[in-house]
Image (cartoon, rainbow, N blue to C red):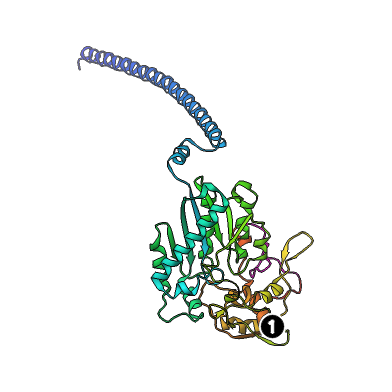
């Protein structure tokens, strides 16, 4: 073996390894230096991003401050442009179900022609009222929205000795087509659908800069009172509203203190055409709730509101001011039997119904069954308390309020 040659070979390989190790060390140093440089550059970008974020937040705060200043002055830049280009208008909102605002039979019986005549007469009466409110309301655009459950309203119309050829839908077609901003809308079955439409429309138009005045046809239904209370506290908004009287005004509605009230007797049936005479409710006898009342414009089926007002009120409160239910003592068997009849609580407790799938034809019920029906109705939570989160002040509310004193029953 040539040891000298082998030794020389090992030395050459050793030198090569040293060269590679030196290159490796140089590469590691280059990587470390590059990482440090990149990290420094990244820190600078992070710092710059943080500063830009702070500048953006400061800019947003300043924008919001300026926006608030503009709004406090009356209008935003966008709405100011809109105000200059949009003319003022007036809105008429009507809960047109049969329990409050029934168009006169002379209109119903003429179908489309009657709808057109009713629209013209309503427009005439609204313009006459607006002239008395302010000269600025003369010749403004007038938008009319009448909401009803057509199925329920047709049943009410048939009970009024109307002509067999009369058609509610033809009437509504004539009414809607007569003027561009007039609408008679079928909201479908359901006791709260028309109410919901009017509440939302009222909220929208009351705060609309170009809506100069609102005429409200909701005087009969105290269920609207909680929604109106928010406007009663604002003098500017409250002055924009006129209450249109129907055949009656709810006491709680009257208590809101409307600045203006008006009647349109040439448009809507009034007085005895819709109301029932006062009668007592003897505790030991049955009472005919489903009464057909003869009036100037024909019979109409409606329970006696004077009876219901006496039985449903007054509101009871405990020492903490919490409303609780009136104690009712009814046998369980009677409650179950009454429930099986599927009687409409709106019609027999509150006095009217906008249309539902329950029985509206039960002619006679006694007082205990009436109380049983109220117990059944109180199982449904009061929408004012549980949906709007407000105290219910409606003395005629038939729904539950979550409190029942001992011995109350149901």
Residue identified by numbered label 1: 368
Q: Name the image quarter holding residue 108.
A: bottom left
Question: Is residue 243 found inside the magenta-colored segment of the image?
Answer: no
Q: Which residues are magenta?
A: 389-405
- Measured as percent of width and height from the top left, residue 359 is found at 54, 81
Identify the residue shown where x is 70% and y is 87%: 285
Using the rendered image of the protein, determine whether residue 200 is visible from the camera's viewpoint: no
- Measured as percent of width and height from the top left, residue 47 is found at 47, 23
- The quarter of the rendered structure image containing the C terminus is bottom right
Tell me if residue 227 comes above or below residue 69 in the rendering: below
* Magenta highlight: main SS: loop
**Number of callouts in the render?**
1
- The quarter of the rendered structure image containing the N terminus is top left
Identify the residue shown where x is 39% and y is 70%: 112
Q: Is residue 375 left or right of residue 101?
A: right
- Measured as percent of width and height from the top left, residue 171 is found at 42, 70
Q: Name the image quarter holding residue 300.
A: bottom right
Identify the residue shown where x is 45% and y is 39%: 84
């Amino acid at each position: 073996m040539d040891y000298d040659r082998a030794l020389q070979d090992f030395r050459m390989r050793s030198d090569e390894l040293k060269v590679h190790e030196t290159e490796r060390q140089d590469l590691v140093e280059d990587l470390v230096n590059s990482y440090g440089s990149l990290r420094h550059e990244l820190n600078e970008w992070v710092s710059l991003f943080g500063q830009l974020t702070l500048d953006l937040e400061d800019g947003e705060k300043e924008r919001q401050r300026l926006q608030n200043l503009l709004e406090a002055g009356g209008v935003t830049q966008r709405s100011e442009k809109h105000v200059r280009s949009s003319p003022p208008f007036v809105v008429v909102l009507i809960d047109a179900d049969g329990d409050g605002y029934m168009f006169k039979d002379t209109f119903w019986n003429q179908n489309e022609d009657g709808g057109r005549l009713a629209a013209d007469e309503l427009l005439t009466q609204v313009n006459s009222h607006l002239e008395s409110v302010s000269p600025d309301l003369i010749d403004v655009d007038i938008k009319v929205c009448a909401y009803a459950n057509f199925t329920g309203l047709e049943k009410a119309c048939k009970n009024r000795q109307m002509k067999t050829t009369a058609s509610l839908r033809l009437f509504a077609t004539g009414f809607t087509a007569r003027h561009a901003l007039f609408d008679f809308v079928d909201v479908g079955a359901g006791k709260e659908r028309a109410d919901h439409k009017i509440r939302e429309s009222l909220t929208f138009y009351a705060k609309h800069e170009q809506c100069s005045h609102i005429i409200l046809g909701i005087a009969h239904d105290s269920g609207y009172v909680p929604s109106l209370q928010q406007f009663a506290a604002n003098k500017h908004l409250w002055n924009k509203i006129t209450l249109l009287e129907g055949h009656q005004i709810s006491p709680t509605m009257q208590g809101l203190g409307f600045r203006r009230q008006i009647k349109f007797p040439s448009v809507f049936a009034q007085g005895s055409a819709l109301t029932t005479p006062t009668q007592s409710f003897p505790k030991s006898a049955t009472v005919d709730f489903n009464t057909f009342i003869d009036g100037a414009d024909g019979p109409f089926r409606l329970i006696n509101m004077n009876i219901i007002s006496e039985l449903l009120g007054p509101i009871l409160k405990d020492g903490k001011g919490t409303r609780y239910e009136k104690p009712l003592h009814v046998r369980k068997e009677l409650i179950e039997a009454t429930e099986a009849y599927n009687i409409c609580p709106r019609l027999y407790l509150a006095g009217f119904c906008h249309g539902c799938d329950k029985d509206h034809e039960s002619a006679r019920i006694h007082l205990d069954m009436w109380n049983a029906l109220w117990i059944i109705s109180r199982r449904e939570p009061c929408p004012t308390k549980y949906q709007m989160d407000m105290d219910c002040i409606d003395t005629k509310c038939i729904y539950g309020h979550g409190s029942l004193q001992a011995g109350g029953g149901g």
